[in-house]
Image: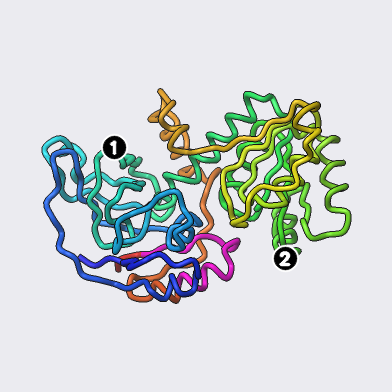
Amino acid sequence: MKGIVLPQYNKNIIRALLSLRPEEKPLRKPLADEVVIKMHAAPCNPSDIAFMQGGYNIVKTLPSIMGFEGSGVVTDAGKEAKHLIDKPVSCFVQEDSDGTWAEYLITKKENVIVLNEKMNMDQAACFTVNPFTAYGMMDIARVNESKAIVLDAAGGQVPEMMRAMAKSEGVESINIVRKQETAALLKNEGVKHVLVETEDNFDDKLKTLCHQLQATTAFDAVGGILAGKIFNAMPLDSELIIYGGLSNKPVSELNTMNLIFNQKFIYGFSLPDWKEELENFAEISEYLQSKFIDGTLHTKIQGITSLDNVVKGLRNYIANMSAGKILIKPS
């Protein structure tokens, strides 16, 4: 079977991309608790980009086939997973093994979610990470009884899903973007509160909105100075949750007095850790699938590329990530 192999990590993203190569590998038989998935599609996520650069928290023995997430159909299985044969599945794998950018994936049965037959398989390729991240973080806002939330990198997929969830629950959202073009797109989609971080008086505008709307929960995918600015702008008894590091910079410029006297907190959100604590994962999965099936939730997909053209496809994606995901398909 063919897969896209990363030979070594490289902090220079262009060099990392150019090192990717299609390679034929033998397809072994599954172990007792494993399934063989004929891949339908796999997305490129920011975590895949960080992984290529050696800047992600997952480290694999290289060379290795790329990809953490995808969808497909189970074609073979070990004795403990025979019941999954012929089932459409979404999968997420981060073990020290080959990934999803391939014709086939072998992984443990615990790494797959059996799909409703009405689930679109392109959407299913992006199902195991972002929708659950959005749902899990909205749970924090619910517990906090927040009347409004703050979202940076607001042109991304997780913020879009969180906006939809927040709107259905009567929760306002303050959306922060880097570019005027992204702000215009969001406003054209009917998003009410949009701020551009490079605008004059951004700090003052953000603080005013946070206090007016009582935005006591914020979700940061960027880190760096922006995370500090959001934290400083929020009212008393607020929480800043870090779930990404797109800037590749440490959180900075936190107002120390806010930490001491304003009862503000800052901490991280890890999807695997959140999942481990769940007792109703299957119920949440069914709920989220129903929202994709009825169109309430969706993942923007800007294009599709083949295994042989993956470098060109990924370069286009990185140049305009806010336009949506790119899917890698074996055929």
Name the residue at 77% across, 57% down.
Answer: 196
Q: Position of residue 37 (x, y in %)?
A: 24, 52
Q: Position of residue 207 (x, y in %)?
A: 84, 42
Decide which of 297, 141 is in the foreground and name it.
Answer: 141
- Local crowd at mark 1 within 10 Å, few (<14), some, or many (≥20)? few
Q: Which mark is residue 5?
A: none
- Find disc 1 in the rendering and name its residue: 110
Judge whether residue 321 is colored magenta.
Answer: yes
Stretch in magenta: 313-328
Q: Position of residue 230 (x, y in %)?
A: 75, 44
For residue 291, above or below residue 247: above
Would you say residue 271 is visible in this rendering?
A: yes
For residue 146, above or below residue 174: above
- Find disc 2 in the rendering and name its residue: 181
Judge whether residue 267 is colored magenta.
Answer: no
Name the residue at 51% across, 40% down.
Answer: 133
Name the residue at 52% across, 73% down.
Answer: 316
Q: Position of residue 42 (x, y in %)?
A: 38, 58
Q: Amino acid at mark 1?
A: Glu
Number of marks in the rendered image: 2
For residue 7, above or below residue 297: below
Which numbered disc, 1 or 2, marks the residue closer to the eye?
1
